[in-house]
Structure formats: structure tokens, C-alpha cells
Image (tube, rainbow, N blue to C red):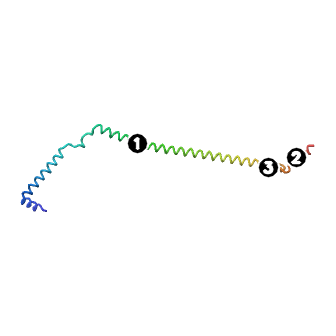
Amino acid sequence: MSTSERDELLDDDPVLNEALRNFRSSVCAWSEAVYARPRTALKAAPRRRVWRLATGWALGCALIAGAVSGGLYERHHRQELARIAATRAAEHERQITAQRASEEEELLARVDSDVSREVPSAMEPLAQLMTGDEIR
């Protein structure tokens, strides 16, 4: 609708013109009332509310710090247990290796003693008789 058509409509109907003026004045009065009333966001918060908010934040931070430090301690504890288990496994492996080495040494000593004999064990009684004859 153009401006000239609107002006013609307002000039033709005084009741509409009066209703629009009343509506405009109501809107202006409402706007002034809203702008004039005090702002609640600009007021200082009561001390109790500030302390409650600060306490909430402090407890939340303490809870987070506790959870993080607990997780780090658990991780460290698991690493220590793994290190101890690895040390025990390495010690057990060394013991097994030492035992196998001693068994091999004993076996080699037996083989060496068996090989170092001058006479086989089945012929030993005969060898003793011969040695006794030589002494006489």
C-alpha cells in the first residue's frame, strides 16, 4: 500500500484514525515503562549467592582434580606392577637358564669321566687283576 492510499484511508475513517493514535500512545507508554524500570542484571548479586557459586566451582574443580590425579595414580600403579612382573619373569628366565647350564655341565662332566677311563666299565675287574699282578 502506498503512502497516498494510506493517507486517504486515514482521512476517510476518523474511528480508525483514533484507534491507531490510541494504539501508538499505548505502545509508547509501555516502552517508556519498560525502559524506566530498574535492570536486575545490573544489580550486584547477594553475598550468599556469590559464595554459593564460588563454593560450587571450587568443589567442581576439586572433583575434577581428584578424578584426574586418581587416573594418573592408577596408570602409574599399573606400570609399576608391569615392571615388577617383567623383573620377576626375567629373574625366572635367568634361573631356568642357570639350571639348564648346570645340567649341561653335569652331563658333560659325566661324559668326560666316562671317556677319560682307560678301560671300559665292563672290563674293569680284569683291569684290576692286571694291575694287581704288576704290583707283585
Q: Position of residue 78 (x, y in %)?
A: 52, 45
Quadrant in the rendering for residue 14: bottom left
* Residue at mark 1: 63
In the picture, which quadrant includes the N terminus? bottom left
- Circle 1 residues within 10 Å: few <14, some 14–19, many ≥20: few
Q: Position of residue 129 (x, y in %)?
A: 90, 47
Question: Would you say 106 lies left or right of 54 here?
Answer: right
Question: Would you say 63 lies left or right of 116 here?
Answer: left
Question: Would you say 53 lies left or right of 43 here?
Answer: right
- Circle 2 residues within 10 Å: few <14, some 14–19, many ≥20: few
- In space, the residues marked 3 and 2 are separated at their CA atoms by 17 Å
Ranked by sequence position, the earlier of labels 1 and 2 is 1
* Residue at mark 3: 114
* Residue at mark 2: 128
Tell me what residue is drawn at x 49 percent, y 44 percent: 74
Q: Position of residue 107 (x, y in %)?
A: 74, 49
Q: Position of residue 21 (x, y in %)?
A: 10, 53
Question: Would you say 2 lies left or right of 100 here?
Answer: left
Dot 2: element: helix
Dot 1: element: helix
Ranked by sequence position, the earlier of labels 3 and 1 is 1
In the picture, which quadrant includes the C terminus? top right
Tell me what residue is drawn at x 62 percent, y 46 percent: 92
Dot 3: element: helix
What label does residue 35 carry, if any? none
